[in-house]
Image (tube, coloured by chain):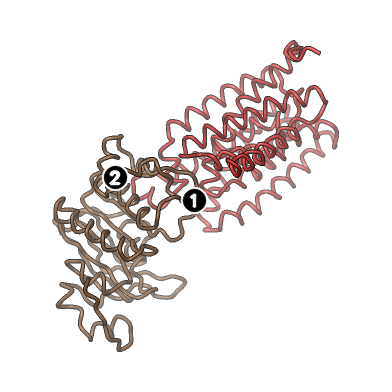
Chain colours: A red, B brown
């Protein structure tokens, strides 16, 4: 079997392009969420993203666009509720996650009932990335990376020590909002390949794997991206050849890398 | 008021209807080394947070460098070392040089700040690998990167061993004298602070005393500050 046969299929090339973008942006944003101890926001936004997809299908708009819009709005609302109502972050998320899922379930049943399409949104699929979607994913992915690098110091300071950042002159309210928007965009981009239920894993597991080896925040991010790239690229190959849901394969590979890294570190 | 770096006028604060601070009037002048002391729950950290705009008083106003704190923007003039106790993010792999760099400034400023606190050899170490005293010095370096005129420290010696505490106060004295850096330090450790600072302000909801520690810290004050008649034992070191 010629393993490069896979690249003669344009849907696979689209899947790899989208997968690489996701493998870079998810752990990049995930690193800040992990330091901030706010990584569950990714799971919350991914459930809300399902509602965004359903809205797109209902009104006949490009689902990726409506997903990005809905998750950004939800992300800003979550931040607003957390700050103005002084409710702890985990409690806010515990309200928004089922709320988002409940809305999604109702909207999806209005669209066309529960069918295999839903399965691919929940767990990811290599065949669902449409030609026009690749451009959105690439452009939004590049904007996400450039924005993160531009505001890197402020994002790190705010995530690590918000109070000190504020007295250090960082506009923490705006930086928190920015991080929420970047998270929302990353979650929306990742849904096609990894699926709504598993995006959070791709934002967290490569980061925790890298933390076992990292000698600085910067190196941890680079390692996390490397681990995510391995998981996504190998995962897409396995998904194609064994006809398995991409999200499941990628996440299990991420967990395998985490375990292997732990073992290697223990015995060296 | 023009030479005062920090001024609070008639400041009061409440948590859930319970009075934490009542009608505090205090100012800190350039070049001072002031210790803000009081028992746990006395409101000293609350007062500190009001001074730097992290909390809003229910009454009264706070001023930084003569400007109302709500509209203050020259944060590079202030270095702040927060209470470290609850900061779990120190367990994340972040290097010393990265932590100091959060305060802005290029490689040269970061190196100079680390030299000022004696931590330049550990610049590539992880924060999590440092002792409590070493971590504290790195946090001070971060606060020094912008060349501030005022350095504020909230309970800086919690979790720091005695030897490191001695070195820490020597460092602060040096910064105060050599760089004319104004210092405001919040601590519950009365006996140590009494020895090390130029001015002391005692808080327990109200301002109980304010002035030279050797004149102000007598038996009466202890009773007012702690609400009991306690004997103060001072250790010379």
The quarter of the rendered structure image containing the C terminus of chain A is top right
- Quick one: label 2, few (<14), some, or many (20+) residues within 10 Å? many
- The single residue placed furthest to the front in the displayed view is A268
Drawn side of residue A163 relative to residue A248, left or right: left
Q: Which residue is drawn at 25% across and 64% down?
A: B8
Q: Where is residue B110 in the image (x, y as percent from the top left)?
A: 30, 40
Q: Is residue A143 above or below residue A1?
A: below
Q: Residue at x 74, y 10 (%)?
A: A8
Residue B114: mark: 2
Q: Do labels 2 and 1 share a chain?
A: yes
**How far apart are the two marked residues, 2 and 1, measured between alpha carbons?**
20 Å
Q: In which quarter of the image is residue B22?
A: bottom left
Q: Position of residue B170 (x, y in %)?
A: 22, 59
Tell which subunit mark 1 falls on. B
- The single residue placed furthest to the bottom in the displayed view is B229
Q: Which of A217 and A175 is in front in this view?
A: A217
Q: In this view, does B20 lie above or below A182?
A: below
> What residue does disc 1 label?
B91
């Amino acid at each position: 079997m010629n393993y490069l046969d896979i690249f003669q299929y344009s849907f696979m090339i689209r899947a790899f392009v989208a997968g690489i973008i996701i493998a870079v942006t998810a752990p990049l944003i995930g690193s800040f969420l992990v330091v901030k101890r706010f990584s569950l926001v990714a799971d919350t936004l991914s459930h809300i993203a399902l509602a965004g997809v359903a809205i797109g299908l209902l009104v006949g708009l490009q689902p990726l666009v409506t997903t990005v819009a809905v998750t950004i709005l939800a992300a800003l609302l979550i931040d607003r509720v957390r700050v103005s109502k002084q409710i702890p972050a985990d409690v806010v998320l515990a309200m928004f996650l089922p709320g988002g899922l409940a809305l999604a379930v109702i909207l999806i049943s209005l669209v066309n009932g529960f069918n295999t399409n839903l399965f691919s949104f929940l767990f990811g699929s290599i065949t669902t990335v449409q030609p026009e979607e690749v451009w959105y994913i690439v452009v939004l992915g590049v904007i996400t990376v450039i924005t993160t690098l531009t505001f890197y110091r402020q994002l790190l300071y705010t995530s690590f020590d918000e109070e000190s950042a504020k007295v250090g002159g960082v506009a923490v309210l705006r930086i928190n909002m920015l991080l929420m928007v970047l998270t929302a965009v990353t979650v929306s981009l990742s849904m096609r390949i990894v699926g709504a239920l598993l995006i959070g894993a791709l934002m967290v597991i490569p980061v925790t794997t890298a933390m076992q080896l990292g000698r600085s925040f910067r190196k941890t991010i680079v390692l996390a991206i490397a681990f995510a790239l391995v998981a996504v690229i190998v995962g897409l190959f396995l998904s194609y050849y064994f006809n398995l849901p991409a999200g499941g394969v990628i996440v299990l590979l991420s967990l395998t890398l985490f375990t292997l890294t732990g073992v290697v570190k223990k015995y060296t | 008021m023009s030479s005062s770096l920090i001024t609070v006028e008639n400041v009061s604060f409440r948590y859930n209807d319970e009075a934490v601070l009542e009608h505090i009037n205090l100012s800190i002048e350039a070049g001072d080394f002031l210790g803000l002391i009081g028992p746990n729950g006395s409101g000293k950290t609350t007062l500190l947070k009001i001074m730097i705009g992290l909390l809003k008083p229910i009454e009264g106003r706070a001023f930084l460098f003569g400007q109302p704190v709500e509209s203050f923007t020259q944060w590079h003039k202030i270095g702040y070392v927060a209470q470290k106790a609850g900061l779990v993010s120190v367990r994340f792999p972040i290097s010393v040089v990265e932590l100091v760099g959060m305060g802005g400034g290029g490689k040269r400023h970061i190196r100079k700040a680390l030299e000022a606190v004696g931590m330049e050899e550990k610049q590539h170490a992880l924060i999590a690998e440092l002792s409590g005293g070493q971590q504290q010095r790195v946090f001070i370096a971060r606060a020094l990167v912008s060349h501030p005129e005022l350095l504020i420290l909230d309970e800086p010696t919690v979790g720091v061993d005695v030897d490191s505490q001695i070195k820490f106060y020597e460092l602060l004295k040096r910064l105060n004298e050599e760089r004319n850096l104004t210092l405001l330090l919040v601590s519950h450790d009365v006996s140590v602070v009494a020895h090390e600072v130029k001015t002391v302000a005692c808080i327990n909801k109200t301002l109980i005393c304010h002035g030279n520690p050797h004149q102000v810290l007598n038996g009466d004050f202890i009773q007012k500050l702690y609400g009991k008649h306690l004997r103060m034992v001072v250790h010379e070191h």
